[in-house]
Amino acid sequence: MKPYKSFIRSILKIQRTCQLYIYPRIAKFGVGRGQWYFLNRLLFENDGLNQETLSEEMVVDKAHTTRAIRNLEENGFVCCQKDEIDGRKKKVFVTEKSREIESDYHQIFKDLNAILVKDFSGEEKEALRNYLHRMMNNIQEFIDESERTSGH
Amino acid sequence: MKPYKSFIRSILKIQRTCQLYIYPRIAKFGVGRGQWYFLNRLLFENDGLNQETLSEEMVVDKAHTTRAIRNLEENGFVCCQKDEIDGRKKKVFVTEKSREIESDYHQIFKDLNAILVKDFSGEEKEALRNYLHRMMNNIQEFIDESERTSGH
DNA sequence: TGTATTTCGTTGACGAGTCAACTAATATAA
DNA sequence: TTATATTAGTTGACTCGTCAACGAAATACA
């Protein structure tokens, strides 16, 4: 297997192969393949975000966020609460049940990260982080720009 | 926006944001969002692959490949032909119609790649390509290994 | 104040992608 | 040769994710 000229092609393939790692492991916790990244965000960083913010951060349609959060709620991983100040917003919090599995659940993703860069030096990992961050900013900036001018 | 500690999280976000770039552009050619990577593989590298091989390369379920190729065929981008030696295999070829749009269609992905690494030096691009390739091998190797031992 | 506009979330319809069960063709082995 | 197992592709049922339309709450503005 040779390196791809196309960056997006490599990104896509890594992403898909990682799903093969993630799906069977999160399934053991009862988390669906369309929900893990929401739970990760809320559990490993901070909760209390509303669905609009979650949609933007995860870069998914808000319709999907509605259904994914509802699913997580039905399975007891999160609970929602209307924003006192702005009645349109629904704030999402993780439950005690999520906190109980947090450590074991987190291990899945720590392990995956270790596998991805298993032969990388410390400097290489730092460079990679920097490159990924810049690529993310570059494409995000382009999308934001075109929304501001034409679309919106 | 700060860099993520998690590599898979960065990969996923870049991948999703790129879809926002790709979808409206391929739609102009009549190519669906579940088909572009098949067409890219066949058009920009070489055609005549069977569906099993395509599924492996794209890292998608063969059921999806069946339907995606059927869709591309119905829209005139590819045509299929039974393998003379092995009657189970279906070889997929691009059509004249695909060759006609090839140059304009290819430009979409050239542009996207340029956007992603717009502020990267030549050395940085080379390093990135190397890192992506190694990550891909690392996770692929892990998946192959676990299939060989437990699953299969 | 009342009217228009924007924002947040939901719903319905649909294409994307997975999983398991199946058919048909090939390969293996007695 | 015949029985068995494997491989390539298809189908059905399901979840994931998008898009467009909508309702309700908040905001902007006359």
Image (cartoon, coloured by chain):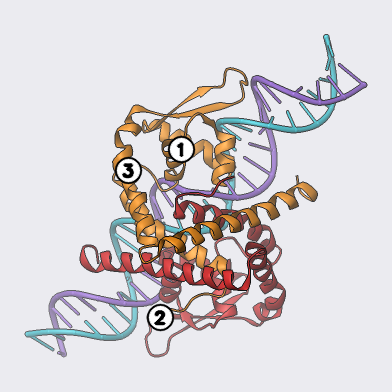
Chain colours: A orange, B red, C cyan, D purple
Which x, y percent locates residue A119? 36, 67
In the depicted view, which residue is nearer to us: A123 or A63? A123
Q: Which numbered disc flags the more N-terminal residue, 1 or 3?
A: 1
Give the quarter of the figure containing the C terminus of chain A. top right
| Chain ID of residue with mark 2 | B
| Chain ID of residue with mark 3 | A
Q: Which residue is mark 3?
A: A105
Quick check: do tags 1 and 2 share a chain? Answer: no
Q: CA distance from mark 1 to mark 2?
A: 48 Å
User: Dot 3: few (<14), some (14–19), or many (≥20) neighbours within 10 Å?
Assistant: some
Q: Residue at x 53, y 82 (%)?
A: B47
Q: CA distance from mark 2 to mark 3?
A: 41 Å
Q: Is residue A72 left or right of residue B14?
A: left
Q: Secondary structure at mark 3?
A: helix
Which x, y percent locates residue A116? 39, 61
Q: Secondary structure at mark 1?
A: loop
Q: Is residue B73 left or right of residue D14?
A: right
Q: Amino acid at mark 2?
A: Lys
Q: In the orientation shown, which residue stands out farthest toward the front?
A: A123
Quick check: do tags 2 and 3 share a chain? Answer: no
Q: Residue at x 42, y 90 (%)?
A: B84
- Name the mark nearer the viewer: 2 or 3: 3
Q: Amino acid at mark 3?
A: Tyr
In the depicted view, which residue is nearer to us: A63 or C23? A63
Q: Are marks 1 and 2 in contact (CB under 8 Å)?
A: no
Q: Which residue is mark 2?
A: B89
